[in-house]
Amino acid sequence: MRFHKALLFYSSNFGIKTAIKLVFVPRMRSFFKKPSGYTDRLVDWFFNLFARNCLIYQKEHTQSSDRETIETSNIIWTLWWQGKEDMPYIIQKCHQSLRKNSNGREIRLLDKDNYNNYFELPKQIEEKLKKKKISFTHLSDIIRLIVITKYGGLWVDAAIFVTHPIVASGQFYSVNITKNASPDYPFGRWVIGVMGCGKNYQPLCFVRDCLIDYWERYNAAVDYLMFDHIMLLAYMKLSEFKEDVDALSPSLGNIHGSRYLFNKEADPQRFKELVNNNDFLSLTWRFPYNEFTDDGKETYWGMLLNKYDK
């Protein structure tokens, strides 16, 4: 977003002080060749916004040894808002891979017609959904946190291709990509597209409440990755969450690293490393994957289907 448009957007949606804090100062620091400090500034903005939530969870919720685990519920949650019958081809293949590798867990596919069988959205969120003041992307952030904190279990995004039987366990689980992420990238400790917890897991209850509070107050996302920034706030302020996150074993691969690789000619050795090092692969349905290149060579997508679509 261009500087003047960003200033206007932040000023009109969040006020001039926020525009200065999150747009003007970071841009000026970058102009003078200094680190922008944007992530720290945004987390601090969220902390000021959710100071009361932080205080409540820090005082009232303490870690206990008898917390429920992901395995207690044995559920895998996923969402395709339009319903299974309207899944694009790539999403269909991802869903098939999820069912094939569910490892005995129950799969619950949520959509616009059945979600209220499991929970009720807050009234203000429902109204904003009807008025298109909240996107489906940000709605899904709220939904995933509601179901895994209410019922427990694992959330897997619809565009995730699963390559091995799922073995997620513990009070909190996610994919840790710190081994292959940039040291400057603060969110590699978790992947929100693959995330689970035991029922009523308090750190994610905190994130859930913050997201709902945010969308009841505002009509625009302060940042596309605001979910990650609130997770980072929880990591910094809730010792229980920090301990659970730090206990995750780093993945050998990178769940996001292959998204734009699949239309390229496949190298068998690189493909082997890709699937051996990643239990989950993040894909996209927004453009087609082809099984062969224009000159007839098998692509990574074609090789993936050949190996798993049987």
Image (spheres, helix red, strand yellow):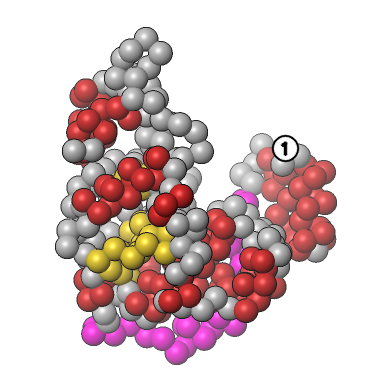
Q: Which residues are magenta?
A: 37-66
Task: Please state if 285 lies on the left or on the right of 275 as rendered.
Answer: right
User: Which residue is identified by label 1?
Assistant: 31
Viewer-side residue, 310 vs 192: 310
Residue at position x 52%, y 86% in the image:
56
Element type at marker 1?
Answer: helix
Let me know if residue 119 appears in the view. Answer: yes
Viewer-side residue, 276 vs 286: 286
Task: Please state if 190 lies on the left or on the right of 213 as rendered.
Answer: left
Does the magenta segment cover residue 176?
Answer: no
Percent coordinates x, y for residue 28 in the rendering = 75, 44
Does the magenta segment cover residue 46?
Answer: yes
Viewer-side residue, 114 vs 233: 114
Let me know if residue 24 appears in the view. Answer: no
- Residue 188 in the image: above or below residue 33: below
Q: Quadrant of the rendered structure where residue 216 is?
A: bottom right
Q: Quadrant of the rendered structure where residue 243 is?
A: bottom left
Q: State the predominant SS element of the stretch in magenta.
A: helix
Percent coordinates x, y for residue 184 in the rendering = 48, 45
- Residue 244 in the image: above or below residue 251: below
Q: Residues within 10 Å of mark 1 (few under 14, many from 20)?
A: few
Residue at the limit of the structure toward the top, as seen here: 295
Percent coordinates x, y for residue 3 in the rendering = 78, 42
Percent coordinates x, y for residue 115 in the rendering = 46, 70
Residue at position x 33%, y 65% in the image:
108
Which amino acid type corresponds to the residue marked 1 in the rendered image? Phe
Residue at the limit of the structure toward the bottom, as seen here: 60
Residue at position x 23%, y 44% in the image:
163
Q: Quadrant of the C terminus?
A: top left
